[in-house]
Image: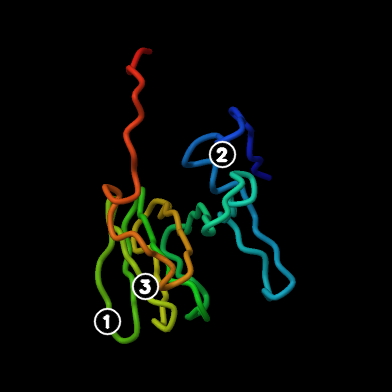
Amino acid sequence: MGMLNTLSKGTNYDAISTGGIDAIDTFTFKHEALPVDVEGKVFVSEALGMSGGILSLNSLAPHTSMPFHHVHIEHEEIYIFMGGQGEFMVDDNRFEITTGSVVRVAPEGVRCWRNTSNSPLYYAVLQVKAGSETVKNTIEDGRGVNRPVIW
């Protein structure tokens, strides 16, 4: 069974490790609303102290599919594919995904995906409340700090 390890923690940050991308395979997500346990899934939001979204790290075994289609009530999802290849479906549209693919799905989009390769499909999913973004780019939200960069 996978374990999240704390790397460092401070007033304004939390840093954790899964033990490597392939260690995601060792995690199992259990929830009373699900008919089966989900292998290769870990929510890291709580361990990171997140207050503005939900983040999970995931692995889908070779030649397998998500066992169901789903939608969300309020959350849009951003899928970031970090390894492997597969196929993604939103509503009636299908397209190939591979390492480096990033997909955003609106809450009402009916989604499902599958791994079409001989190796695991690794991906992160970030859920955020649709319409909650008030700043359109990081330039508007970020501020420089008068501090020299010294390592």
Where is 115 relative to 121, above or below? below
Q: Residue at x 34, y 59 (%)?
A: 135
Image depth: mark 3 or mark 1 in front: 3
- The label number, if any, that marks residue 17 in the structure image: none
Judge the density around disc 2: few (<14), some (14-19), many (≥20) Cα neighbours within 10 Å. some
Residue 64 coordinates in the image, percent (x, y): 45, 66
Q: Quadrant of residue 112?
A: bottom left
Instruction: Residue at 63% x, 34% y: name it.
Output: 5
Q: Is residue 74 in view? A: yes
Q: What amino acid does circle 1 point to?
A: Asn
Residue visible at 29% across and 60% down? 136
Q: Is residue 8 above or below residue 20?
A: above
Q: CA distance from mark 2 to mark 3?
A: 26 Å
Q: Give the left or right position of residue 37, taking residue 68 as reference.
A: right
Dot label at residue 93: 1
The circle drawn on residue 18 is 2
| Quadrant (top left/top right/bottom left/bottom right) for the N terminus | top right
Residue under label 3, please give it: 105
Q: Nearer the viewer, residue 57 or 85?
A: 57
Looking at the image, which residue is at 55% across and 48% down? 25
3D distance between C-alphas at marks 1 and 2:
33 Å
Q: Nearer the viewer, mark 2 or mark 3?
A: 3
Q: Is residue 16 visible?
A: no
Number of numbered discs visible in the structure rendering: 3
Q: Position of residue 66 (x, y in %)?
A: 48, 71
Comes first in the chain, label 1 or label 2: 2
x%, y% of residue 99? 29, 51
Q: Nearer the viewer, residue 102 or 8?
A: 8
> What element does badge 2 sit on?
loop
